[in-house]
Image (tube, rainbow, N blue to C red):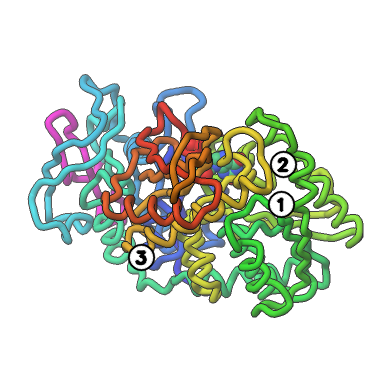
């Protein structure tokens, strides 16, 4: 494959995949490698440039990661970031010291705009994101200083003759205002990339790689209808067609019409050539959940039942060679320094591998962030309503109905949620919100409709803004939209006579209710 590539050398920092993603945003392919990758392998890969990441260590720690000096002699441009800049300085004979004043956060920085890194920046100073306790006190021979802050004499240094550049700050995080321009300059001006990578190329290459890896093998995929598993399934179906079987369990806790929507896309009438098995397990779930009110118990039952059903289906199919998982980068917790990664315990299909007889796992989206997965989905021609689907918990509406789950309550929350989503979409607000949904409280109250007294349930609407889903702010929805949604829910959803709006942030709340 003769494509430009930037290699990110992972020294254990938090933002390593983010660097790769920012470079890909410049239309240049980028992959993260552990710092233990050999020099011979780097020569073989022959990247257009290398980026050293940050990391938690001090270059003087005994166990701190380093790289042999010869990497600087390869003639490949290198950008060192934070700890990576200190590794560069230290290895080439400069001096790294504990800084008298640690810098953390937004920091005003003076730039020398004759540097190739800063040429696209208009002003002589800019705000960058700093996070360091050590700093470069003296640059190696042949280097010059190209940026400084009030407390950091070497915020950036370079030796353009050798293609070596370094920043103490993090250009990859969005708090560094002009960071993307700096990375772009490194990739284009210093490394000489042309920008030959698009999501379409990723899709085509992944398909080709999967084809080669799978050969004539049989592949099994648990399809939830969510973005990640849908994109993974479509990639596989494009690669190996009928060798793929997708099992979709409709547990009766999906959003309104969702089961049919998934079937319309992936089933026999859809655009994809695959063996699609829909298991209609609605009643089975409602029976299991009867009388259960404890949220954790509900989650456990829903998860276990899913595994049982999948196991039954897998038995019918017989031995398979590959199991597909829609794991994406945020699901992968780096266990540090490029060692093998583990999957978050709450991951929807985290419990699957043990119950199916298979040889290998395929995770085609492992490197991507959610919005990159969406782009890949659009490239693959997956309908927009599936690609931009709201995040949805594995246990589905089971955790959006407080208290006992019944078929009747599922209908209420499905209908209310559908109206809410429809009105937010009509108001043009849907793409700007992090997550929004209707839940059903366990509270009934008195109302009056027509000439009759009612004693019905209260629906609660939730809308939050969040980028990482670890914290979230309650989103502000215009009152006129809320009035419209409320009026429609009360008029159209039998069994509901009151609508409330949940103003809680996370923390102290969570996004879901249970
Ligand atoms: P919480 O409620 O913990 O939710 O603030 C954070 C995000 O995770 C989603 N969520 C889940 N996703 N399986 C999932 O795949 C689950 O069991 C689960 N529970 C919560 C939730 O929708 C939100 O986006």
Residue 339 seen anywhere in this rendered image of the structure: no
Outermost top residue = 100
The response on whether ligand 1 sits within 8 Å of label 1 is no
- Residue 251 — which label? 1
**Image point 53% across, 55% down: which residue?**
415
From the viewer's perspective, tell me whether residue 133 is left or right of residue 301: left
Ligand 1's quadrant is top right
- Residue 98 — which label? none
Q: CA distance from mark 3 to mark 1?
A: 29 Å
Q: Tell me whether circle 1 and circle 2 mark residues in contact (CB < 8 Å).
A: yes
Query: Where does residue 66 sit, x and y in percent of width and height?
Result: 47, 36
- Sequence order check, earlier mark of 3 and 2: 2
Of the pair 371 and 150, the residue shown nearer to us: 371
Question: In what element is the residue under mark 3?
Answer: helix
Q: Is residue 200 above or below residue 509?
A: below
Sort mark 2 into few (<14), some (14-19) or many (20+) by Cα contacts within 10 Å: many
Query: Where does residue 81 sit, x and y in percent of width and height?
Result: 34, 43
Question: In what element is the residue under mark 2?
Answer: helix
Which region of the structure is painted magenta?
A: 141-166
Query: Where does residue 249 sit, x and y in percent of width and height?
Result: 74, 56
The residue that mark 3 highlights is 426
- Sequence order check, earlier mark of 3 and 1: 1
- Residue 302 — which label? 2
Q: Is residue 161 magenta?
A: yes
**Image point 42% across, 74% down: which residue?**
196
- Sequence order check, earlier mark of 1 and 2: 1
């Amino acid at each position: 494959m003769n494509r430009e590539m930037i290699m990110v050398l992972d020294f254990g920092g938090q933002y390593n995949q983010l660097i790769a993603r920012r470079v890909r945003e410049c239309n240049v392919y980028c992959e993260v490698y552990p710092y233990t990758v050999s020099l011979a392998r780097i020569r073989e890969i022959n990247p257009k440039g290398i980026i050293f990441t940050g990391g938690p260590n001090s270059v003087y720690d005994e166990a701190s990661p380093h790289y042999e000096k010869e990497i600087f002699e390869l003639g490949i441009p290198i950008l060192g970031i934070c700890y990576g800049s200190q590794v560069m300085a230290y290895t080439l004979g400069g001096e790294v010291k504990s800084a008298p004043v640690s810098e953390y956060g937004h920091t005003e920085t003076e730039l020398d705009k004759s540097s190739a890194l800063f040429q696209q920046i208009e002003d002589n100073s800019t705000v960058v994101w700093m996070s360091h306790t050590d700093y470069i006190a003296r640059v190696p021979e042949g280097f010059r200083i190209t940026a400084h802050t009030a407390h950091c004499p070497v915020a950036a240094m370079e030796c353009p003759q050798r293609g070596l550049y370094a920043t103490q700050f993090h250009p990859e995080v969005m708090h560094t205002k002009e960071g993307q321009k700096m990375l772009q300059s490194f990739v284009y001006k210093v490394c000489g990339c042309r920008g030959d990578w698009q999501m379409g190329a990723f899709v085509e290459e992944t398909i080709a790689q999967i084809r080669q890896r799978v050969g004539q093998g049989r592949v099994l995929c648990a399809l939830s209808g969510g973005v990640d598993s849908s994109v993974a399934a479509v990639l596989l179906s494009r690669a190996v067609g009928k060798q793929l079987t997708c099992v979709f369990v409709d547990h009766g806790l999906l959003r309104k019409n969702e089961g049919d929507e998934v079937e319309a896309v992936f089933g026999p009438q859809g655009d994809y050539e695959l063996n699609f098995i829909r298991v209609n397990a609605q009643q089975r779930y409602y029976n299991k959940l009867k009388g259960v009110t404890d949220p954790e118990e509900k989650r456990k039952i829903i998860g276990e039942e899913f595994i049982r059903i999948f196991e039954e289906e897998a038995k019918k199919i017989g031995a398979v060679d590959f199991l597909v998982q829609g794991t994406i980068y945020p699901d992968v917790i780096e266990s540090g320094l490029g060692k093998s990664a583990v999957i978050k315990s709450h991951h929807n299909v985290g419990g699957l591998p043990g119950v199916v007889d298979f040889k290998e796992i395929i995770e085609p989206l492992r490197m991507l962030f959610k919005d990159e997965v969406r782009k890949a989905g659009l490239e693959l021609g997956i309908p927009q309503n599936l690609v931009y689907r709201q995040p949805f918990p594995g246990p589905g509406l089971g955790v959006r109905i407080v208290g006992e789950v019944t078929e009747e309550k599922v209908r209420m929350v499905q209908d209310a949620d559908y109206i809410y989503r429809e009105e937010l979409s009509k108001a043009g607000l849907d793409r700007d919100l992090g997550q929004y949904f209707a839940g059903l409280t366990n509270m009934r109250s008195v109302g009056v409709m027509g000439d009759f007294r009612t004693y019905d349930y209260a629906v609660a609407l939730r809308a939050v803004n969040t980028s990482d889903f670890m914290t979230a702010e309650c989103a502000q929805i215009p009152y006129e939209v809320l009035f419209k949604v409320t009026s429609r829910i009360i008029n159209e959803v039998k069994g509901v006579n009151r609508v409330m709006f949940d103003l809680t942030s996370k923390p102290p709340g969570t996004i879901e209710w249970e």
